[in-house]
Image (cartoon, helix red, strand yellow):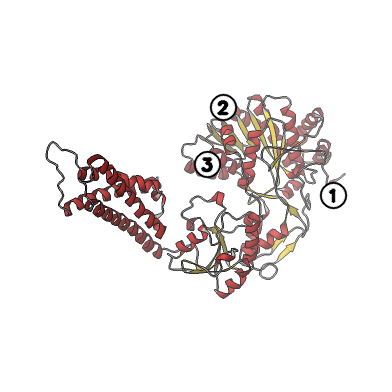
Amino acid sequence: MKRFINLLTYTVYDFFAAFFSVLLSIFLLDRDLGLEWPIVWNPNLFFIASLPFLVIFFMYVLKLYNVLWSFSGFWQFIKLCIATFAATVSAIIISVSIFGSSHLGASLPIFSYVLTTALIILQRNLVKLHFSRRKSDEKSSIYGNVMVIGAGDAGQGIIKELSRYKDVKVCCAIDDDKAKHNQYIFGVIIVGGREKIIEAAEKYKIDTIIFAIPSCPNDKRVEFLNICQETKCDLKLLPPLYALQDMGEFHQQIRKVEIEDLLGRPPVNINVEKVAAYIRDKVVLVTGGGGTIGSELCRQIAAQKPKQLIIFDVYENNAYEIQNELKYNFPELNLITLIGSVRDSRRMDYLFRTYKPQIIYHAAAHKHVPLMEDSPNESIKNNVFGTYKTVQCAHKYGAEKFVLISTDKAVNPTNIMGASKRICEMIVQSYNNRSSTEFVAVRFGNVLGSNGSVIPVFKKQLEHGGPLTVTHPNIIRYFMTVPEAVSLVLQAGATAHGGEIFVLDMGEPVKILDLAENLIRLSGFTPYKDIQIEFTGLRPGEKLYEELLMSEEGLEGTENELIHIGRPIDFSEDELFETLDVMSRVMYDEEEDMLRLVKKIVPTYQIPKNKQK
């Protein structure tokens, strides 16, 4: 809307500027308009009528209505002069072709061109002046002496924008292109390539470094940022090219460097059209919709215009937050928010009977490994039987597709949480063989920033001055950001035919120790000097590394190189449901040995030695 109003304002102004310029020129030249009744067209009248429209036309052709005039430069004003000149010449040509060369003369077009151009340039310069004065009184989120990495279009734009703030001084720029070294951008010297970063940071007493190469490959960006961390400056960056919202105004898009920026992962690309077609005009249910994964599922699903989106969660605070967010961002969305537990058969039956969801994303689960080790029956009640009851309802009420959110901890599980998720996968696979509903599972590793993940824990420890606690110096995990994981889950759901276990490519494994050290550096401290790191030992049920496939499972590719399909492992469905029946009777008995029953269903489950009988 704001862009439309700006476009309309500029267009109307340019029209009347040209119209007034021709009238004033005719008045100054004492030309006869010939306005006696009946009005007869003459060259003067035709020139008045045609020039304003031609000015707008050529301004549009030269894309001058796409220019942010608050950040415009010399070449934008040259193009403006060309546009008004082209409009004037076109008006002359048309007038001469109609009335003949002797009727128009040269003085009127010249006066009109000069006045039109002057009035439009005056207005554009007033816009620049207003913006400059307003910015000089504001305070930027960037402070002190600044180094900009990147001397391309984005870097130049940032240098120019920051020059408008009184409390910011861009001291130098860095670029690996040797042809740019010792050159100047708006008075700022390009001191050299990445090898000069540390030296220049000390020489110019840099407070903030801005990485401004949005087209830079992720691995190269990580190399730059790792060097920048050694300076202890405040690190900020311009998002990658695909994430930029406005190519004309960079300053507002600069953000703080986060830990995920140091993973070096390639951007996740999904078939947006396929996902949109799969979700659009469908009733979609997200269980656990208030959690980290569930809430992001709701955000991305809402953007694809479903017929109705149902958030279902047992924790009302999380559900309330995502509900308000979606109502604000998607006011046209048909949104239903329900509180309840997937363990409640009657509640689930009411939900499916009333709303008839066509697509179900089942994200509700207990996920904290150490807590579930101390409460194994609760893991079975919520994860296994919550899934079982939701699956039964999806089958009973004829849902089109059911997508289970699973985990890499389901592979050769050493903890009850992982084993419970493996049972969920088996339930989903079994029901796919006996139902018209397509049942699939999507398995992935750790998600950065999710509830219970290591990053929020580290940040809390940093707030208290440390130490950061790592269970083992060699422990590794696969990591993915929440939006990345969810976008791939949606892509997998859109391509599923039923019975698959989708495995997401989590990239290269990351050492938790490296994450801890990088997070300390990003916070402006030195690991082991300012902030200590302590090793606490592996927790109950914790592995040094996680696997995404069992040895018996093969791996098939899909249209998305980051999504694979694991070949289902054969198992006895009769034995599965017989054991589940036993579990349902005894899981409320706290004395019952639930782990033995889990081992019966999941032979690869490794019962902890201290719990073996």
Mark in front: 1 vs 3? 3
Helix, strand or loop status at disc 1: helix
Mark in front: 2 vs 1? 2
The image shows residue 338, relative to residue 468, as above or below, that is above
- State whether residue 72 appears in this view: no
Residue type of the residue flagged with mark 2: Thr
Q: Which residue is mark 2?
A: 354
The x and y percentages for residue 279 are: 57, 33
Q: Among all residues in the image, which is located at the extreme left? A: 36
The x and y percentages for residue 565 are: 73, 37
Helix, strand or loop status at disc 3: helix
Residue 238 as seen in the image, left or right of residue 217: left
Residue 190 as seen in the image, left or right of residue 128: right
Q: Which residue is mark 1?
A: 610
Residue 16 as seen in the image, left or right of residue 508: left
- In the rendered image, which quarter is residue 407 located in? top right
Residue type of the residue flagged with mark 1: Asn
Q: Would you say the residues marked 3 and 2 are in contact, meaning their CB atoms lie under 8 Å apart?
A: no
